[in-house]
Amino acid sequence: MKFFAFHLMPWDRLPADFAERYDSAWTTVPNSLYDSQHGGQLYNDYLDQLVLADKLGFDGVCVNEHHQNAYGTMPSPNLMASILARQTNNVKIAVVGNALPLYNPPTRVAEEFAMIDCISGGRLIAGLVVGGGPEYYSFSLNPTHARSMYREAFDLVLRCWTETGPFEHYGQHWKLRYVNPWPRPIQQPHPPIWIPGAGSKETIQFVAQRRFAYMGIPYFHLDFFQRNFDLFRDACEKNGYTADPEQLGWLLPIYVAESDEQAWAEYEEHLWYFVRNLLKGLVIFPPGYTSVRSIAGIQRGLQQFMTSCQTRDDIERGGYAIVGSPDTVREKLKTYSQRLGVGNLLGLFQIGTLPHELACKNMTLFAEQVMPKLRAESQR
Amino acid sequence: MTPNVQHRFLHVGGKKTQLMTLGAGPPLVYLHSAGGETEAIPFHHKLAEHYTVYAPAHPGFALSEGLNDILDIHDLAWHCVDLFAALELENVPVVGYSLGAWLAVELAILRPQLVSRLGLISAAGLHVEGAPMGELFIDDFDKLRELIFFDPNSAAALETTPSSPDDSRMLMWLRAREATARVGWNPYLHDPKLPRHLHRVTQPTTLVWGRHDKMIPLAHGEYYAEHLPCATLQILEACGHGVPWEKCEEAAALLV
C-alpha cells in the first residue's frame, strides 16, 4: 500500500450564508469573494502541509487542476508541483492531473511535466485527465469534443515522450508541423500515468487496455467505488492480465485525532463546509462529455454522492470520509481498502475550512500511528 | 387534431434521419428547437390544418444519427440541403423555432431557392450586445422552466421537461442536449458571421417573439427585423421563450 497526501487547496472563507445566497461554488461564483492577501497565506500553508508529508514519510503528494471556483484554487497544479519538486526530497509528485483539452497545443503538458520530472529527479506521476465538467463551462470549451480531444492529446503527449522529434502531428483537433519538445522526462519510457474516472465504461476500458492506473473520482459511497474497481479488474482480465492493486487509487477525506469524539468535534464543521458549500453546483457531466448512457448512469449514481449526506451517520455508513482515533481510522482503512483491493490510498488531510494546525496534526498522527501498521500489513 | 401523423426514416447523405409528416396540403418544413420536439405537439397540428408538415429530427436528436459529422451550424445547414433534395422539396415555406429558426436562416443563405418564406420563432443565431442569452445548459429543470416559460408552473412547462433522472424521456433529453451543445456551445448559440449575411435573406419573413423571452431576449428579434430585408416582427404578450406551447394558436395564425 502506498500513501499519498492529496491537496485541493480550497477557499476557506466563503460567507456563512453562502449556500443560501449562491447557486454554485463553481464557474460563476463571484471572484470578488477572493481575498488575495489571505489567498497568499493559504497557498503557503497548503504547500507547507505537502512539504510536511515528505518529512513524515508519505510515499507521495498529489495536486490537481480546477479553474474559477472555490473548491480548489489551483488553476495551475504544475506551478505547485514545481515548487514541491524543489522543496521535497523523497515523495512522488502526482499531478492528477493536467486537463489535456485545456492546453493548446497539448504538447505544453509534455513539456511542463518533463520539466517537473527533471527538476525532481524523476519523481513525477503524470495524471492525464479530461478535466472536470465545470472546466468546460469556465473555458467555454465544447464538451461534446472532450473525449476526442482527450484521446488525441493523450496519444500526442505519449508520443512526445516515447519518440524523438521533430515529427509532424496531424489530428482532428491539432495540426502541428514540428513537434519536438525540450526537455524530455528522466523516467523512461515515460513517467507513470494515472487516469481518474467516475465509472464510465469507456474510461475503464481505456485505462485497463493500456495498463495505466485508475483513480476513482471521490465523494461517492463505498459501494460505488466497489462497483467501478470491480469493473476495472474485470476489464484487465479481459485484456489478458490481472490488475495490480497499485493500478487502483482510492481518494477520500481522512481525519485522525486523539479519540473518536475529539476527531469529530474538531473536524465536523469543516467537513460540512466542504460538502454544503464547496461541492455546491458541481456539474459533473456537461452535455456530450461522455456517452448519454454513462451520463444517465452517473446521474442515478448521484444518489450515492456525498452531497446527499445530511448527518455524521450518513458520512460514516457510506465511507465518504474516515474520521476517528488512530485505531478507528486504521481499522476502517484496513477493512475498506482490502475490500476495494486498492494499492494507493489518497488522503485529503485538509478539507474545507480545516485550519493549518489541525491539518498538520492530522497528518502527523496519521503518519505516526496509522500508516506504519497499514504499510507493514500490506507487505505481509 | 390531424390523424395522419407518420414517422419514417430516410438516409440523407449517409445519415439515418427520423422524419415526421402530418397534415395535408402544400408542403411546409418545420425545424425543431434544442428541446427536440420531434413528436407531434399541438403546434404541429395547427400548422398541419393548412399544410403537409415535414418535421425532421436533426442529427443526434431523437433517433436521427450522424452527429459525428456535424461540427457546427453550417454542417447542420448542409444536412438540410441534402434532406430537401431527398424529399424533392424546393421553394417551400420553412418554420423554425429557436435553434431551428437559426438553422432556417442559415439554410436560406446557403440555398435561397429552397425557401419560399420564413417563419422564425424566438430565433437563436445572433449575439446582441447588452441582451445576453440565458444559460440553456443547466441540469436543474426548475430553473430551466423558469428560463423558458412565462409561467414555469403551467401544464405546458411541466410536460416539456423530464421530471427526474428516472424519467423515461431522459436518454432522449440527454441526446438533445449533446446535439445542441455540438453546434451551440461556443460560440454560444450563434454564428458571429451571420449579421454580415442577413442582407442576402430576401424571402418574406415573419418573426414571432414572446415579449418576456428570457432565453433569447426580444432585442434579438428586433435586430433580425431591422437587418433582414423583408421581415416583420410580431410580439406576443405574456409569453416567454416557449412560444409554440405558450401561444400555440396565435403563433400558428401568424405563420400560416
Image (spheres, rainbow, N blue to C red):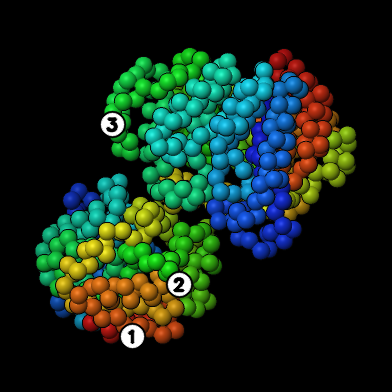
* x then y, percent, for residue A241: 49, 20
SS state under label 1 = helix
SS state under label 3 = strand
- Type of amino acid under label 3: Tyr
A294, above or below A112, in the image = below
Specify the label residue B250 is tagged with: 1
- Look at 16% across and 56% down and name the residue there: B82
Q: Quadrant of the C terminus of chain A?
A: top right
How far separated are the C-alphas under marks 3 and 1?
A: 53 Å
Read off the chain for label 1: B
How busy is the neighbourhood of tag 1: few (under 14 within 10 Å), some, or many (20 plus)?
Answer: some
Mark 2 lies on residue: B214
Q: Is residue A339 visible?
A: no
Image mark count: 3
How far separated are the C-alphas under marks 2 and 1?
A: 20 Å
Do the residues bearing badges 3 and 2 touch, measured as CB atoms within 8 Å?
Answer: no
Tag 2 and tag 1 share a subunit: yes
- Look at 16% across and 78% down and name the residue there: B25
Q: Nearer the viewer, mark 3 or mark 1?
A: 3
How far separated are the C-alphas under marks 3 and 2?
A: 42 Å
* x then y, percent, for residue A115: 51, 22
Q: Earlier in the sequence, mark 2 or mark 1?
A: 2
Specify the label residue A170 is tagged with: 3
Is residue B8 left or right of A340 when viewed as pictured? Answer: left
Read off the chain for label 2: B
Q: Quadrant of the N terminus of chain A?
A: top right
Do the residues bearing badges 3 and 1 touch, measured as CB atoms within 8 Å?
Answer: no
A98, above or below A301, in the image = above
- Look at 14% across and 59% down and name the residue there: B86
Read off the chain for label 3: A
Do the residues bearing badges 2 and 1 touch, measured as CB atoms within 8 Å?
Answer: no
